[in-house]
Amino acid sequence: MAKAEKWYKKRYFDEIIFFGAIFILTMVPDFIKPVSMMYLVKNMVFLALLYGQAILHRYFIFPFFITGQYVRYYLSGTLFIILGAILLLAVDYYWIDPEYYKTADVILFKDFLYNVVLCSISIAAFLSLFLIRNYSRELEKKNKAQLMLSEMNIKYLHAQLNPHFFFNMLNNLYGVSLTEPSRAPELILKLSDLMRYQLENANKDIVNLKEELSFIQNYIAMEKERVGKRCLVEYNIEDKEMKAQNYQIAPLVLITLVENAFKHSLTTEREWFVRIVVRLENGVLSMSVHNSMPDQNLKTSSTGIGLLNIRKRLELLYSGHYMLDIIEEAEEYQTNLVLSLKHYNHE
C-alpha cells in the first residue's frame, strides 16, 4: 500500500494558504481603518468568486492547452473570463456596493474591464502556483523512481539472473553440445542476449515493450532447457494488432513474475507446470502467470521482496492505472497483472 501523503503536502492545503495570503494582502489597506464584519464578509465572497473562477479555469479550460488545442483554449478562456467579469460586476452592483453604482459618474464598462483584468491576474497566479507545484512533485517523483530503479537494479543483479542460473545453463549447454551439437549455437545466442539485455537496459527508466517480451521469451527458453521435460512450460503472446513495438514499459517489472513461477512451482506429486499468457490491446498489457504449487518438502524459502518491490514500482510509476492480483489455491498459484502502458509517470 502506498504511503499516505502528509497533510501539509495536500493540494487543498496549498490552495488555502494561497487564498488566505491573497485575502490578507487585499485587505491590508482596510485594516488600517475600522470596518464592519459585513464588509469583510462581502470582500471575502468577492475574492472567493474570483478565486473560484480561476479554479474552474484550471480544471475545465486549461486541459485544452495541455492537449495542444490552443485555438479552443484561447476562445473558451476568453469567454470564461468575460463571463467571470460579468458575474463579479453583477455581485458588486446588486449586493457588495450598490450605493457606489447610483452615482452619476460611474462607467460600468470601465468597472467591467477592471474585473476582466482581475480575472486574468487571478487565473495567471493560480496557474503559476499549479505549474510550480506540479513541476516540484514530478521532479520528486522522478527522483524517487530513479532511486527505486537503482535499488531494483542492485537486487536484480544479485538475485535475478544470478551465477547459479548461469552455472546451470552452462552445464546444460555442455550436455547439449555433446548430444545435440547443432542446437548449441542457438542456446548460446539466447544466453548472450539475456546477458546483453540485462547490462544494457537495467539502468534505463523505460524500454521498448517488444524487446522486454523478447527478453522474457529468451529467459523462458533457457528455463525450458534447465527443467527439461519434467515441467510443462507454455508462453503465449496475444498481440493481434502487432503493436508491441509501439509501446514502452518500465524495465524488469515482468521478469520477476516469470522467475517466481519457475522458482516456486517444483512438484513431484502433481503435474509441474508454468503457463504464461501476455495480451496487448489498446495500450493495455495483461499478464497472467499460472504455476503449480510446490510440494511441501520442495518449497524454497521466499522473503516476498520481489513482489513487494514490484508493487512499489507499479504504485510509483503507474499509480491508479494498474492492477496486480495474486490468487493462491491448493494446486495452483496465479499472478495477474493489468497495466495501462499509456500512463507511465516518467516526466
Image: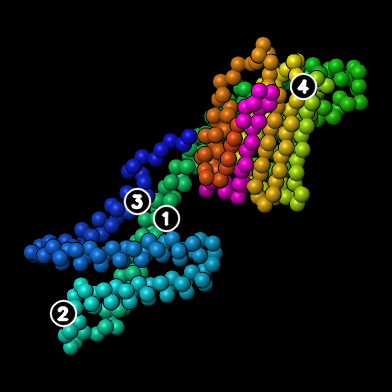
**151 with respect to 14 (left or right):** right
Residue neighbourhood size for the residue with mark 4, other residues' Cα within 10 Å, grouped as few (<14), some (14–19), many (≥20): some
Q: Which mark is residue 160?
A: none
Q: Which mark is residue 99?
A: 2
Considering only vertical position in the picture, is 11 above or below 178? Answer: below
**17 with respect to 215 (left or right):** left
Find disc 3 in the rendering and name its residue: 12
Q: Amino acid at mark 2?
A: Glu
Q: Amino acid at mark 1?
A: Leu
Q: Which residue: 40% across, 63% down?
A: 56
Q: Is residue 191 visible?
A: no
Q: Nearer the viewer, mark 4 or mark 3?
A: 4
Q: CA distance from mark 1 to mark 2?
A: 40 Å
Considering only vertical position in the picture, is 137 above or below 112? Answer: above
Q: Residue furthest top?
A: 297
Find disc 4 in the rendering and name its residue: 271
Which image quadrant for residue 128?
bottom left
Q: Which residue: 43% across, 46% down?
A: 137
Q: Earlier in the sequence, mark 1 or mark 2?
A: 2
Question: Is residue 203 in the magenta section?
Answer: no
Image location (x, y in percent) of residue 319: 52, 43
Find disc 1 in the rendering and name its residue: 131
Q: Amino acid at mark 4?
A: Glu
Quick check: marks 1 and 3 in contact, CB under 8 Å?
Answer: no
Quick check: marks 1 and 4 in contact, CB under 8 Å?
Answer: no
Q: Earlier in the sequence, mark 3 or mark 2?
A: 3
Q: CA distance from mark 1 to mark 4?
A: 57 Å
Q: Which residues are magenta?
A: 327-347
